[in-house]
Amino acid sequence: MSLHRKASVLPGFGLSLGFTVTYLGLVVLIPLSTIFVKSAGLGWTGLWDAVTTPRVLASYRLSLLASLTAAVISAVFGLVVAWVLVRYPFPGRRLVDALVDLPFALPTAVAGIALTTLYGPNGWLGARLAPFGIRVAFTPLGIVVALTFIGLPFVIRTLQPVLEDLEADVEEAAASLGATRWDTFRRVLLPAIRPALITGFALAFARAVGEYGSVVFISGNMPMRTEIAPLLIMTKLEQYDYAGASAIAVVLLVISFTLLVTINQLSSRNRLTGATD
Amino acid sequence: MPQALAMRTSAPPRPRRAGPAAEPALVRWILMATALAFLALFLALPLVVVLTEAFRKGVGVYAAALRDPDALAAVRLTLLTAAIAVPLNLVFGVAAAWSIAKFTFPGKQLLVTLIDVPFTVSPVIAGMMFVLLFGAQGWFGPWLADHGIGIVFAVPGIVLATIFVTVPFVARELIPLMQEQGTEEEEAAMVLGASGWQTFRRITIPSIKWGLLYGVIVCNARAMGEFGAVSVVSGHIRGVTNTLPLQVEILYNEYHLAAAFAVASLLALLAIVTLVARSLVEWFELHRRTDTTHEQETTA
Amino acid sequence: MHSHRTLPLLVALALAGVAPAPAQKPVTLLNVSYDPTRELYQDYNAAFVRYWKEKTGQDVTIRQSHAGSGSQARAVIDGLGADVVTLALAGDIDQISARSGLVPTDWQSRLPHNSTPYTSTIVFLVRKGNPKHIRDWEDLVRPGISVVTPNPKTSGGARWNYLAAWGYALRRPGGDDAKARAFVAGLYGNVPVLDGGARGATTTFVERGIGDVLITWENEALLAVRELGAGRLEVVMPSVSILAEPPVAVVEKVAKKHGTLAVAQAYLEYLYTDAGQEIAARNYYRPHSETIAAKFPGQFPKVSLFTLAEVFGNWSKAQATHFADGGTFDQIYQARGATP
């Protein structure tokens, strides 16, 4: 990477970069630093103790496992949906395509009460599932449902461009060489879309880990069982344990940041290598 | 927030007809049924629930819920918050995209990653930071108290939390767009004697205008819908520091389910408008590109 | 005082709609309260505004904020500009005093009855017909019974519920702390969801149909029956319960800064007048005044009540033993978490 500015003809470098960095510093970095400073006040051992109590560990486990499960479900069904949207013409396809973005646009609180009403014991779906002994609301299953809702568009939107770019001739060549459709899918197409699939999965996962609004209504909020990490942070705040809350937050932030860096690496690699060949 | 949320800038190819290399019809039908059932279950149903529950007690209750003074105050606060947060993040987005897309400098990748950070921070943490910063026991607490300035548990805190949460939206929309467009046109203009601002106004802005609009639309949707972060800094003062999402929660907790869904339906409506607007803007951008390509081809 | 010259002016002003009483600037009060008092303060505030206007000619606007008592205390400490706090338990106001000095340390002696204008108790709310035959505390630990109660870490009502259960178990023959702890653990073993506040728990029980029994404030239970139909719910009074005392206080430092000290003081004092007591009783809070209580026969059944002071000493001890980090509530939940 050159240390010289590439386009020295264009003005505004100092101004735009300066503004950007200042704004970012004031709005994002300084506020974030308060979390680290607060938890630093605990010292390393204090920090370790605060984040490894059974209740805190249970909340991480729940947040991470539920997010992982939701991301897997999103990945599998997201692939199916993306495939169908890209490959099969049907009336209303554009409408369905637009609908995929709903979780981006709908406020999390609205999603939360809607899902809770839907899956609660009196809800349309909850009432139908109850006779089978399946309870969704107030169980980890409900949390997974909510997290799937918000993660789905990430997978679909990451896969669509890649699927669209796939060249037909590779598949036709495989078919003419005698491969079954399933073989073609498994050995030719899947490897081609795998990077995008992983990126979409990671995005859905990252988004789900910190999610609060849509989960807090449908979750039972039981310590050790259905208490997600963000809620535990709120609870600690309420107990004046700012340092403890910050400690938990720090762990979440580190996880999210690592995911973010990984995702950015993956997607820049995708862009460079392209979807096929 | 890589490409997943970015505007689609090339026309999706029309679905191909089934050829010799396609899967059998049965498989196709199963896949389609699965996909549509899944979407109906996970996406459409919640939306339908909001609308049906909103009208469960009739149109009268629905209208009364929306005319309620606290609900109207929530609408005003939500609009005010978005009206401040979105333009600020718009300016930031343009500045960031300009510096990142048109220049090379060390640490560029780091900057891009940092811009994405608010996107991955849990909303509760976002709210908590501002309490740690501006609350009475926070870093600036005593100074603010001495000067009678209230930030948390007042409107400024809500606006700040919203700004934080929506920082990346416009920037990450514009960065790939402007990177794709490169610098030749601007350089040409500069060489021909245009000033920096002229170049920006006449060359850059028109080519990014749809991306800009797209970013504003998604930024706005998120700003108006933010719940977790605002909930921590709000103070829940009725009629004063409750945004629409918070008002939904309050009504939900007061046995006024129909009213809660009525207010929620406003937000759902906003979501639908957002989706429609996004599609329109994508279409316009596509048009702009094909027009530009035609121009280039005819003048070549 | 009025001369011939000023009389026409006053008439003109009166006609213009301006009261000729001593002109005072309108004032705003913020009442930061706990979860179930939403309806109470809606009624009360309207009455107080009228009363104050008649008495002093001043226009007062009262703003309300409601959330779990513990959450509200924390918010006030962090800067939520409350002129008065009307919370669920004295311990929360003590915290405000200890951590921020906004409330004087002797706040509880500033108003009658330990600054508690109305009381309540802890009762059970069950489905109509009481299909699971829930009569008393003992029934709550039966296998197969699902109990709804909020999270004691955030909800004041939840702490009263917890202490009522503990107190009941202590008073059983042969009761001691170990047995009480086992009882409460058994009770929480039957709890499927912990809401953040009393109102959230009521919504869970009533609207979402979770649970067989809701442990809650008496006022909250009676309100639920009124709002959601007597045909769906009924109240069960346990054999013994705790006297729940939700106190009120002026947040002196804030009120002084806002210039609302006099109004704030009057606002709380009005709660003790007959008018205030009647509004409380109408909203299902037990008034101190016997005469007012007599106006609502049958609404407040006699229950054998113990006080917090009798059983637990004071809030700071109760808080430290049960609800602080590592207290009995945490221990109970961790023991549960260990089993699949």
Image (tube, coloured by chain):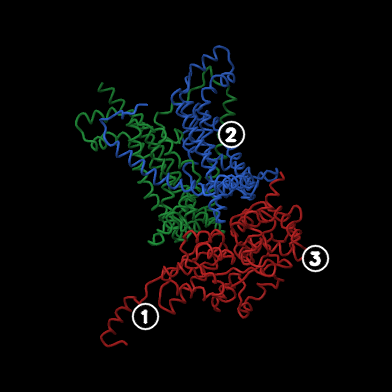
Chain colours: A blue, B green, C red
Type of amino acid at the residue the image marks with label 2: Val
Task: Compute the Cα span from label 2 to label 3.
Answer: 54 Å
Could you tell me the amino acid type at mark 1?
Answer: Ala
In depth, the one of C140 and C284 nearer the eye is: C140
Query: Left of A164 or right of it: where is C156?
Result: right
Q: Is residue C12 above or below residue B42?
A: below
Q: Which SS class for mark 3?
A: loop
The residue under label 1 is C21
User: Where in the figure is residue A151, as x and y percent of width and height?
Assistant: 53, 38
Percent of width and height locating residue C97: 53, 65
- Mark 3 lies on residue: C173
Mark 2, residue position: A72
Label 3 and label 1: CA atoms lie apart by 65 Å
Q: Is residue C226 visible?
A: yes
Identify whether A27 is placed above or below B35: below
Q: Secondary structure at mark 2?
A: helix
